[in-house]
Image (cartoon, rainbow, N blue to C red):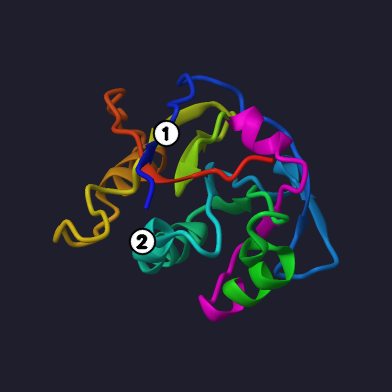
Amino acid sequence: MARTPSNMLDLGTTAPEFYLKDTTSNTHFFSFADLKGEKGTLVFFICNHCPFVHHVMEEIIRVANDYRVQGIGIIAISSNDVVKYPQDGPELMTEYAFENNFEFPYLFDITQEVAKAYDAACTPDFYLFDNQDKLVYRGQLDDSRPGNGIPLSGSDLRGAIDGILYNRTINPEQKPSIGCNIKWK
């Protein structure tokens, strides 16, 4: 199990635009502009097979359910090479989203251009943008990792989202996420 950290894209970066197929509907393509929230937008890179993603998925679902109703757009993206890692292919993404009760789009980045634009390095990798589409947080969900005994809380990410919602200062000292590396072509 690789332990790859986030690249930590510069705060203040404008959200890179995209146009990707949604595997939860299998008929729609969406852009960032289509899915962004009124108050902010959370973009995160995941995949179907990563043990780090499996470890945090329950909390990701709670975060999404808690905040999407408060005006935060929620967008999941998978960018892994599906030739070498067929378990991350779009059909299985649809199944994974259904099994985990995703109430948000799970987009497939077949060209990996979106992952490159976001400078994504691992799964999971989180990017939070304010209502002006400026990056205000990138990094970890919390300090929990598979096997470290720290319970999931989502505290780091939740603190940043609360900062957007309640006009609080978001700490610029942010810890990178740790996970499996993006499986590049």
Q: Distance from label 1 to label 2 (Cα)?
A: 16 Å
Residue 164 versus residue 65 in the image, above or below: above
Whether 169 is among the magenta residues is no
Residue 152: quarter of image: bottom left
Residue 44 versus residue 7 in the image, above or below: below
Residue for badge 1: 6
Q: Residue at x 73, y 55 (%)?
A: 83
Taking depth in this image into account, of 21 and 67 the one nearest to the observer is 21
Residue for badge 2: 56
User: What SS does tag 2 mark?
Assistant: helix
Q: Amino acid at mark 1?
A: Ser
Q: Which residues are magenta?
A: 97-118
Taking depth in this image into account, of 89 and 107 the one nearest to the observer is 89
Whether 117 is among the magenta residues is yes
In the displayed structure image, the side of residue 112 where residue 46 appears, left or right: left
Q: Residue at x 27, y 24 (%)?
A: 173
Quarter containing the C terminus: top right
* Furthest residue toward left: 149
Q: Position of residue 179 (x, y in %)?
A: 39, 47
Q: Residue at x 64, y 45 (%)?
A: 36
